Image: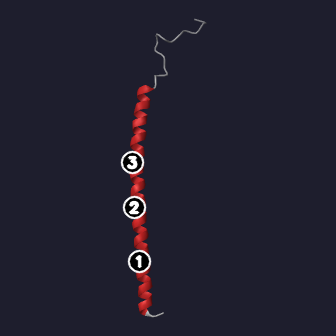
Amino acid sequence: MNLETRIEQLEMKVAFQEDNIETLNSEIFEQQRKLQLLSEQVAILATKLKEHTPNQLASEKEEMRPPHY
């Protein structure tokens, strides 16, 4: 293999690696965007759930005495 052929092969490998890096970067960016959106949606749902879930504890007036009192 001569020097020119080796340089061409290295240039092709570098170009391939640069393309791979750009593709992976785009995928990571898209996943981060989706993750942020999902996190915001979960926070909204958690807030709505807290607003609509009745308190499970009864007040003192609602609390019944056991029959042995």
Amino acid type at mark 3: Gln
Mark 2 or 3: the one toward you:
2
Residue 9 appears at what percent x and percent y? 45, 84
Amino acid type at mark 1: Val
Tell me the crowding category of disc 3: few under 14, some 14 to 19, or many 20 or more residues within 10 angstroms, Cα based.
few
Q: Which disc is residue 26 wearing?
A: 2
Amino acid type at mark 2: Ser
Q: How much space separates mark 2 and mark 3, taking CA atoms?
A: 15 Å
Q: Which disc is residue 56 wearing?
A: none
Q: Do the residues labelled 2 and 3 touch (CB within 8 Å)?
A: no
* SS under mark 2: helix
Q: Which disc is residue 14 wearing?
A: 1
Residue at figure coordinates x 40%, y 81% from the top left? 11
* SS under mark 1: helix
Considering every residue shown, the one lying at the far top of the view is 69
| First in sequence: mark 2 vs mark 1 | 1
Considering every residue shown, the one lying at the far bottom of the view is 2
Q: Which disc is residue 36 wearing?
A: 3
Tell me the crowding category of disc 1: few under 14, some 14 to 19, or many 20 or more residues within 10 angstroms, Cα based.
few
Q: Do the residues labelled 3 and 1 touch (CB within 8 Å)?
A: no
